[in-house]
Image: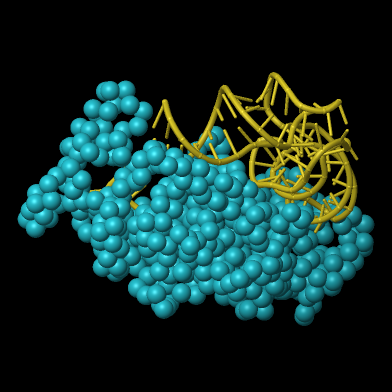
RNA sequence: GGUCCGUUCGUCUAGGGGUUAGGACACCAGAUUUUCAUUCUGGUAACACGGGUUCGAUUCCCGUACGGACUACCA
């Protein structure tokens, strides 16, 4: 396949939703696979929805997930600027062209007039209350007003918008890479506003102009754009760019985990899982939205999980590195139906990735979340992670489960104590602690043989007292391999903990 | 309401005119394990419905139902 030029074009209205991340991933995979270019364009034409910090968030989030931008906001490139608010004059120029060719017109209608028109049509029983071929001649625009009046209004600074003059009776054909042929009759398309009264373009104009100018070959975006895609086709035609029109691929939506509808922040909060890659604090409300990163997810696991929501390679392999995904990806294996978001699967991916990471890489997560005052050498951290890696689901589980390595237990599991803290246990542990105190180095092997020697001489089964030993050392009823745990703790610490349990725990 | 898009186990999905409809997650059971977890083995569980076409339809066609998106001077 020839190198593609694809773009990811979010608007900076808040944190980047996980669905947006998936869209970015698919774009990126196609770009990398074809040795093409991944472009980041910021669609900030709605000044009223601008949220400070959102753009930085988008950049950081993509970086964390592992998506590198080749061209665009943050890196620059031959088609700069890549922020639409900085390209106003460009859109203006093409709007003028459409006007000159009779494919667009000025409209002066106020909001009230538009409202009145819709109500009138509704009352008349019309199924379609749009500003369109059937209604435009009844409105206040350059098609109905004498030219002198139009000029007067424009010169006097009267607010206006520029609308597309959609042909009244025509079938628009569109080939979508995922859905095949899609046909829409122009009677269903309204005379969309192209330029707003504040001088900014709407998405429709800006998107088409930029995609053309930036030589985009494939538009991969969410399904919510499918209904307006025919409108975009019309724009390409009117602008004379039909031959350069990119290929479209409209992605299925991400659905809420239960019930129906598209995934929203409310659902995520309700089910207790994140919806954004990184933590996000809304600048106006101060409300915190949890990120996948802060919730203990690995970026490559999230990427893998997301890539599989709506796409699959057709084989039974599920764990894919970014490189493998790049090689295996293909647009025609993207499904058509919406995918329900199941956080269990994400957790499973995370667990798999955690297990496959090197102890060295994992140690960083443990070191970053040590209990206050605790110190730990990198070497020890790696050992602990190696011991724990089969038992964790999230990155923060390391610190959680490793806590007893850094803090002696302050409480003991009551259930184990009442069941296992008996005379036999006390006898064995007393002797074991004694044996340990004469040892210099302690390996898991030595810890084990030493214990077996003690139980053998006392004639007590080792298995009978292991739970008591564990509770003395960690306070908990369950945990990682005891012998290795003792090796990491060291003989003096183990002996001290046993002695302390011996002196604090009541005899049964 | 209108337009467009969609519908295989609870979930993500493979498949495709004749299959025991496959895998994964989740769930359940068993095995292993000093515990919990891991791991292993096994199990429950799906072609929305109705008409065609056909020797045969889950697969193709048409309807219906259900779901979703869109229907802004938001993207």
Q: Residue at x 63, y 48 (%)?
A: A335
The location of residue A132, given as percent across then percent down, is 31, 40
Q: Residue at x 52, y 69 (%)?
A: A5
The location of residue A385, given as percent across then percent down, is 68, 68
Q: Residue at x 46, y 74 (%)?
A: A71
Q: Which chain is yellow?
A: B
Horizontal side of residue A439 vs A95, given as left or right: right
Relative to A141, does residue A497 appear above or below in the rendering?
Answer: below
Relative to A321, does residue A311 appear above or below in the rendering?
Answer: above
Relative to A374, does residue A505 appear above or below in the rendering?
Answer: above
Quadrant in which residue A332 is drawn:
bottom right
Q: Nearer the viewer, residue A327 or A170?
A: A170
Quadrant in which residue A468 is drawn:
bottom right
Q: Is residue A17 visible?
A: yes
What colour denotes chain A?
cyan
Q: Nearer the viewer, residue A299 or A337?
A: A337
Q: Nearer the viewer, residue A81 or A175?
A: A175
Horizontal side of residue A102 vs A216, given as left or right: left
Q: Residue at x 92, y 61 (%)?
A: A456
The location of residue A461, given as percent across then percent down, is 89, 54
Horizontal side of residue A27 vs B10, given as left or right: left
Q: Is residue A21 visible?
A: no
Horizontal side of residue A187 vs A476, given as left or right: left
């Amino acid at each position: 396949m020839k190198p593609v030029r694809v773009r990811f074009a979010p608007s900076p209205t808040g944190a980047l939703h996980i669905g947006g991340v998936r869209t970015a991933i698919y774009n990126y995979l196609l770009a990398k696979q074809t040795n093409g270019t991944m472009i980041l364009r910021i669609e900030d034409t709605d000044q009223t929805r601008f949220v400070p910090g959102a753009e930085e968030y988008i950049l950081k989030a993509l970086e964390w997930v592992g998506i590198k931008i080749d061209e665009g906001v943050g890196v620059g490139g031959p088609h700069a600027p890549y922020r639409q608010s900085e390209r106003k004059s460009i859109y203006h120029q093409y709007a003028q062209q459409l006007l000159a060719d009779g494919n667009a017109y000025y409209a002066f209608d106020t909001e009230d007039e538009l409202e009145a028109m819709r109500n009138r049509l509704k009352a008349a029983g019309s199924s379609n209350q749009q500003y369109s071929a059937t209604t435009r001649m009844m409105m206040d625009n350059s098609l109905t007003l004498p030219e002198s009046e139009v000029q007067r209004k424009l010169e006097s600074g009267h607010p206006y918008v520029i609308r597309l003059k959609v042909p009244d009776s025509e079938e628009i054909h569109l080939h979508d890479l995922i859905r095949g042929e899609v046909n829409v009759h122009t009677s269903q398309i309204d005379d969309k506003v192209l330029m707003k009264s504040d001088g900014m373009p709407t998405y429709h104009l800006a998107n088409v102009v930029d995609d053309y100018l930036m030589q985009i070959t494939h538009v991969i975006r969410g399904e919510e754009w499918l209904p307006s895609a025919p409108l975009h086709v019309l724009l390409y035609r009117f602008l004379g760019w039909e031959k350069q029109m990119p290929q479209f691929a409209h992605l299925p939506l991400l659905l809420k985990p239960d019930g129906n509808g598209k995934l929203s922040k409310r659902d995520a909060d309700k089910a207790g899982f994140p919806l954004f890659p990184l933590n996000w604090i809304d600048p106006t409300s101060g409300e915190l939205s949890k990120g996948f990163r802060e919730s203990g997810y690995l970026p490559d696991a999230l990427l893998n999980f997301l890539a599989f929501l709506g796409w699959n390679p057709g084989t039974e392999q599920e764990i894919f590195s970014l490189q493998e995904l790049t090689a295996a990806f293909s647009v025609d294996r993207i499904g058509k139906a919406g995918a329900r978001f199941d956080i269990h699967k994400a957790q499973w991916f995370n667990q798999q990735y955690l297990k496959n990471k090197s102890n060295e890489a994992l140690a960083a997560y443990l070191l970053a979340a040590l209990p206050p005052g605790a110190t730990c050498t990198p070497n020890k951290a790696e050992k602990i992670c190696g011991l724990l890696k089969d038992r964790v689901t999230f990155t923060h589980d390391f610190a959680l489960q490793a806590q007893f390595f850094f803090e002696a237990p302050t409480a003991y599991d009551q259930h184990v104590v009442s069941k296992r803290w008996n005379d036999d246990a006390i006898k064995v542990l007393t002797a074991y602690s004694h044996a340990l105190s004469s040892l210099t180095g302690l390996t898991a092997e030595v810890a084990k043989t030493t214990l077996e020697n003690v139980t053998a001489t006392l004639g007590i089964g080792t298995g009978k007292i292991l739970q008591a030993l564990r509770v003395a050392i960690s306070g908990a009823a369950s945990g990682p391999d005891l012998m290795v745990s003792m090796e990491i703790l060291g003989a003096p610490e183990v002996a001290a903990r046993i002695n302390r349990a011996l002196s604090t725990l009541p005899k049964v």
